Amino acid sequence: MSRDISSPIAIDGPAASGKGTIARRLATHFGYAYLDTGALYRAVAVLARQAGCDVADEAAAIAAATRLAPDQLDKADLQAELRSAQTGKDASIVAAMPAVRAAILQFQRDFAARSRPGCILDGRDIGTIVCPDAPHKLFITARAEIRAERRWKELVQNDPSLALAEVLDDIEQRDARDQNRAVAPLRQAADALLLDTSNLSIEEAVTAALDLLRQD
């Protein structure tokens, strides 16, 4: 355990850039708590669907967001649906809703405030909105075709008929929604360090992230 980096650490980036895996590895390395903030929006989408609602129904999504509790992410019935391709698409829809983001924002800030000895949060707006004063920020990205192939390799295990082209199209649509939404769009914070993982293995990417944090 090596606690030589101050907290919170904010990690942002687009889908399948490797930010979640890197964030988890860094949290283990430093002995810090970890929050996958994307899972919160996925959970909102799942809860809305479980209530029999259309995820595009903003009132239903807001109700699901306000019901979200810290221990819910670990529940088996939620976990089973969180990583599906459909949930990923639905999550980007509810994440564009300002009232949903407002509810989730407080959840994230409360997590950061109560986590000891420190924490790492990854998402789309951690360094810009959730924890703008974080002492360390990383923006992790990769080329769209690389990210699509990574995500396809995960999803095709459960859906052998899934085409790589379909996943690439979904990645590009999600990027557009994330970057162009009116509230908290995906963007690199001015003081965030950039890490492109396109040509890196996960081990190389984690090492590169550690090097950047220690140079920051």
Image (cartoon, rainbow, N blue to C red):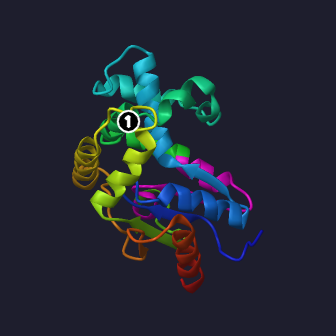
Left or right of residue 197, residue 143 in this image? left
Q: Is 209 rendered above or below residue 90?
A: below
Image x and y of residue 57, in percent: 29, 24
Left or right of residue 129, residue 186 in this image? left
Image x and y of residue 4, in percent: 71, 77
The residue lying toward the viewer, choosing from 52 and 160, is: 160
Q: Residue at the spot x=62%, y=26% of the render?
A: 76
- 122 within the magenta span: yes
Q: Residue at the spot x=26%, y=43% of the render?
A: 170
Which quadrant of the rendered structure holds the C terminus? Answer: bottom right
> Is residue 103 in view?
no
Q: Is 63 rendered above or below residue 137?
A: above
How many marks on residues?
Answer: 1
The residue lying toward the viewer, choosing from 14 and 200, is: 200
- 165 within the magenta span: no
Image x and y of residue 108, in percent: 54, 48
The residue lying toward the viewer, choosing from 108 and 56, is: 56
The amino acid type found where label 1 is placed reads: Ala
Segment tinted magenta in the rendering: 108-128
Q: Residue at the spot x=69%, y=54% of the render?
A: 115
Within 10 angstroms of label 1, few (less than 14), some, or many (20 or more) residues? many
Q: Work out which residue is located at the far top of the displayed protein and give it.
A: 52
Which quadrant of the rendered structure holds the N terminus? Answer: bottom right
| Disc 1 target residue | 85
The residue lying toward the viewer, choosing from 200 and 43, is: 200
Q: Is 58 rendered above or below residue 34?
A: above
